[in-house]
Image (cartoon, rainbow, N blue to C red):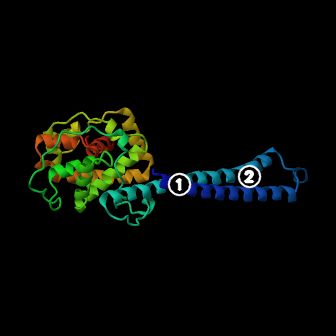
Amino acid sequence: MSLIARIASLSNRDRITTIGMTLTGIWLFLVVLFWVLGPSDAATGAGGVSRLVSTMGTVLPVALVWLGVSLARQLAELRAEADDLRAHLAHLRGEAPEPRPLPAERPRTEARAAMPAPPPARAQPKAPPVEPREAPLAGAGPGVDAGTLIRALNFPDGPDDLEAIEALRHALQDPANSRVLRAAQDVVTLMAGRDVYMDDLPPDPARPDVWRRFADGARGSAVAALGGIHSPEALEVAARMLQEDEIFRDTAHHFLRHFDGLAARLVPQLDDLQIAVLADSRSARAFMLLGRVSGVFG
């Protein structure tokens, strides 16, 4: 998160904390006022159970207030980070950032706002260069060749990776590519927030013919080799996020659906080397991880 986004997040969290302290103070004042003005235990003949109920009635509202404060602070931080990430991607694309709804306000069937690639500190070793084909991909937008799209699917290693930045900018001009890339960036960034980095998850390579069978529509055990991510920690974190995080679950299913469509139109036009480079990209690694957890590969 940038310094500006962090300052905005801290400012929101301070306001939320102030609100929580105010509500707590008001509640405790009302409790003290009730104890001072209300009848005493001796006058009412209240026993231990009554005192226990009174104590719980005093403590529980305070606990609920601070639970709400904690959740609101986390949401404020996520919103600030999302705004910062959207602005960063807009800068990479050379466009002014557009006002977009927050993730919690967007329909589940729509792609969430695009986010940039994982931090450059964990840069992935560069794959062998792919020679671009002269003919553009069918249905992939004018002038988007296979090499450019594969480089875009791996995302830039940092601001100095001008080749990947240009490939990403070019690929994003096509709506079909843009949906896949934005969804891939979303899931890669969200998992990086849980310390699961695609650069740390080299997959067991599947043969090119397995990818071609998948592109032709084969599923289950016929393409089980595509589930080449075997890190127990990464699989456990991804499974827990799919189970507990509704936003991530919707984003992951959106990504799996669009990457499936991308593979169907892209893989048949690639040679074996290009398929190998595609399979080693950050987007493909995220697909292997989430596809295995979701049961796509049987």
**Residue found at the very far right of the displayed protein:** 43
How packed mark 1 is, by other alpha carbons closer than 10 Å (few <14, some 14-19, many 20 or more), is some
Q: What number of labels is visible?
A: 2
Q: Identify the residue at image location x=83%, y=46%.
A: 47
- Between 175 and 296, the one lying in front of the other is 175
Q: Identify the residue at image location x=72%, y=52%.
A: 57
Could you tell whether 256 is left or right of 44 in the image? left
x then y, percent, for residue 204: 24, 33
Q: Earlier in the sequence, mark 1 or mark 2?
A: 1
* Separation (CA) of disc 1 from disc 2: 35 Å
Amino acid type indicated by mark 2:
Thr
Q: Which residue is mark 1?
A: 7
SS at mark 1 in the image = helix
Q: Is residue 111 visible?
A: no
x then y, percent, for residue 184: 31, 51
SS at mark 2 in the image = helix
Mark drawn on residue 102: none
Could you tell whether 40 is left or right of 187 in the image? right
Amino acid type indicated by mark 1:
Ile
**Residue found at the very far front of the displayed protein:** 160
203 relative to 287, above or below: above
x then y, percent, for residue 48: 81, 44
Could you tell whether 80 is left or right of 126 in the image? right
Q: Identify the residue at image location x=40%, y=55%.
A: 85
x then y, percent, for residue 207: 16, 36
Comparing marks 1 and 2, which lies closer to the viewer? 1
Q: Which residue is mark 2?
A: 58
- Between 297 and 41, the one lying in front of the other is 297
